Image (tube, rainbow, N blue to C red):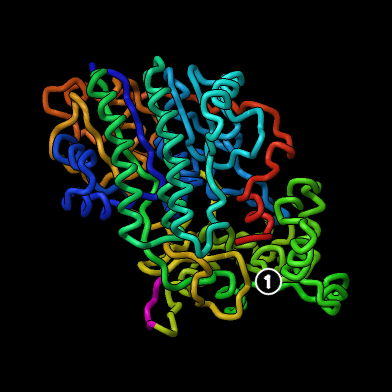
Amino acid sequence: MSGPAVVIGLDGVPWDFIERWTDDGHLPNFARLREEGAAGPCQSTVPALTALAWPSITTGVRPDKHGLYAFSGLQPNYSHSLNTSRQSRHPAMWDALRSVVVNVPMTYPASDIDGIMITGMMTPDGSPQFTHPPEFRDRLESDYPDYRIGLDWKAYYGRPTELAADLGEVLSTRRRLMNDLLDEDFELFFFVYTEPDRLQHLVWDEDLLRSHYERLDDVIGDALAHVEANDGTLYVVSDHGFGPVKRQVNLNTILRDAGFLTPASDDGVRGLLSRAGLTKSRVLDGLEKVGVSENHLVRYLPRQLVDSAAATVPGDHGMYDVNHGETDVFAHGMGNIYINTTDRFDAGTVAPSERDRVKTEIVELFRSVQDPETGERPLRVADGDDLFPTDPDSPDLVVEAGENYTVSTGKLTTAAFSSPTNLAADHKPEGIFLAWGPDIAAGVTPEDATVYDFAPTVLHGMGEPVPDDADGRVLSEIFTPGSSPAETPVASANYGDRVSDGDDEEDDFSGVEDRLKGLGYME
């Protein structure tokens, strides 16, 4: 049996970059993985979103089993609650192994694992719950005082060179930490670099991106040297791919124009505020001038007060400025579509018996939408019952955009199609999977690999049972004939339900950028 498994997660890395730049000689360590191991594209979740893709990678199950469909959860009263590891219902790979887990999105607050954990995206500043054991925080802050979980990449609009430089510093610190922690005693090492995703959202200049990928190649070289010296296996995976964006499709606008969604009327308090010129954008602009930011509002005001203000102050937000009592269908998150049924939502308008009929109409609506500039029909629609069959509270439909398009649910815009605001590129379905080690066959391409296959494959490669409810399969074709993983039948086990750790207190989440998106103050 081979040694420990080392997993390097790369957020938002597309297969075509790896394929092209290894062929061109720019990424020698990735090239070695391709030549001496298994490598190929890996399909993401639907939608291709960090919040559900990483939990799917680490559990081997679909969102209807682990419970995360977006960064924020939708409540029956149409409000939002931030999703964290507490909302994840399924054990991850590291829950059954002696592990080092660093910077994996959606892992805050840290779990009580056998090993070390430093949480990733969705971790609020200053939280005492972002390391396990808790005292590891002292070591991190002492040895790596410049360690950062991430950057507010939206603050770098128009400054791509500065963004690349600052992300490079974040990456360098993370790389030093990785090499330090590789000396720990572990069975599973799972370390994620989110920097490529952040850079690509704002920059789609291939020369600049290739330079960043060359730094990632150095990271792969470090990990490769470690597993080679320790008879281990290296896995590299991304949660989704990336591609340039030229046009934005505004889903709630389409629903409004087709009569399925009704904007909130400007009567009562909203009317008074509207006539006085007090809209969300003007209020926030005025507060910014006196030094009060959106972040301050969310950090220091009670959540219920912020929610109430968001629903009362007039604006064009796709959730807070909607009259749900007169709305049959609405979009939430990245392309998730909900039928406003009476058995699910407080102000539901659609009888459960009419749900399938309305779904059919919405599928036809989105598939027929045509871009007036290009003539293209860019939207793909998937049925939530097919994607998420075990969860009655899953989205009813999921809408994704084709090449050069992205979907938005943030605002009730004037037109269904618009130019993306300060967005150079966005998520696409095709990510990457690579593996190298003594049991991995050379020059093999996995067959139709998906993110759900990752956990079963790694666990089986380690001689561990696969979760008996896994939605993915073991990529058996990547293992060398005659090796233990190739010759040993796949075993399965019930990993049980995940136990949530920590106290669920609202103050834990102050300062989290994505909560602002959920509350409607930024897209």
Q: Which residues are magenta?
A: 374-378
Q: Position of residue 346 (x, y in %)?
A: 73, 56
Residue 270 horizontal side relative to residue 496, left or right: right
Q: Is residue 469 visible?
A: no
Q: Position of residue 79 (x, y in %)?
A: 71, 54
| Vertical position of residue 188 compared to residue 158: above or below | above
Q: Is residue 498 left or right of residue 432?
A: right
Q: Residue at x 41, y 17 (%)?
A: 184
Q: Dominant secondary structure of the magenta stretch? A: loop
- Which amino acid type is marked by label 1? Asp
Q: Name the secondary structure under disc 1.
A: loop
Image point 54% across, 50% down: which residue? 70
Residue 261, relative to residue 344: is it above or below? below
Of 437 and 209, the residue lying toward us = 209
Q: Is residue 398 left or right of residue 462?
A: right
Residue 201: percent from left, percent from top? 45, 58
User: Residue visible at 44% across and 50% down?
Assistant: 165
Q: Looking at the image, which is closer to me, 300 or 15?
A: 300
Residue 232 sits in which quadrant? top left
Which quadrant, please, contains the N terminus?
Answer: top left
Query: In this orientation, which residue lies closer to the viewer: 127 or 498?
Result: 127
Whether residue 342 is visible to the viewer of this picture, yes or no, is: yes
- Percent from the top left, x then y, of residue 164? 43, 52
User: On the image, numbered disc 1 is attached to which residue?
Assistant: 316
